[in-house]
Image (tube, rainbow, N blue to C red):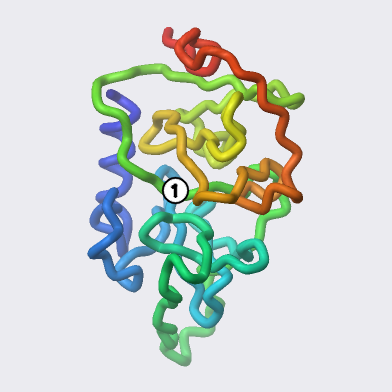
Amino acid sequence: MIAQSFAVLMLASAALVAGVPRDFSNVDPNTLSCDPHGLVFLLLPHFEECDKYYMCSHGKEVEFTCPGGTIFNFILQTCDWAWATKCWLREIIEEIEGSGEESGDFEWFSSDNAHGNAALVPSSGQVDNVKVATPTKFSAILDCSNPSAAVRQLPYKGDCQRYWRCIDGLPQSVYCSDGLFFNEKSQQCDFEGNVKCNVNHEDELTGEFIVYK
């Protein structure tokens, strides 16, 4: 509850974002921008190419490219088949000349943590101090209370089309579009042939992913 309240307060202080909607069906992407505090994760359309998009990481926009044959779906906040979505592009806003300063809107990160996806509807209820353990060889912890660590997305054990990510300080599971699997290396939904996924069918309700303290 504390993490959620803090995220809301930080988002309200953003210069261009009064609040990130959880339903993007009627949202103009030109009205959104990255949360400068890095607490709200969002995917934004490219300005010129349908198969590219920007991910908000540490308050900056980082460019990514969808797998071949797919384009960015702003409403679903993921790469999707070209026939399933329209081409989402943002309008280019020209900067005022004479400022003498370079724009900081586009900054690249080489760290593995500079990846992620945008938010969907968070789970109902009040949950504090939630941590998600990854089923991969990295043995990492998805600590949603830490903005630097929360940008990392993790595979969902037992389902190659599903993955974990942090939304408003809480871990949430998200599905890729039909026919696409989560690629931990590229941190996006990808073709099955590009993904190494070992499925171990285990009970999701055993608490092996989410640890409540």
SS of the residue at dot 1?
Answer: loop
Amino acid type of the residue tagged 1 in the rendering: Phe
**Rendered location of residue 123, percent (x, y):** 31, 29
Q: Nearer the viewer, residue 90 or 40?
A: 90
Which residue is at 36% across, 60% downward? 75
Disc 1 crowd rating (10 Å Cα; few below 14, some 14-19, many 20+) is many
Picture layout, residue 10 above or below residue 19 = above
Answer yes or no: is residue 107 visible.
no
Answer yes or no: is residue 159 visible.
yes
Which residue is at 62% across, 45% downward? 181
Which residue bears the numbered disc 1? 41
- Place residue 33 in its image quadrant: bottom left
- Place residue 142 in its image quadrant: top right
Relative to 16, 50 lies left or right: right
Relative to 58, 188 lies left or right: right
**Rendered location of residue 55, percent (x, y):** 52, 57
Picture layout, residue 37 above or below residue 1 = below
The image quadrant where one finds the N terminus is top left
Q: Nearer the viewer, residue 169 or 64?
A: 64
Relative to 140, 93 lies left or right: left
Picture layout, residue 60 above or below residue 40 = below
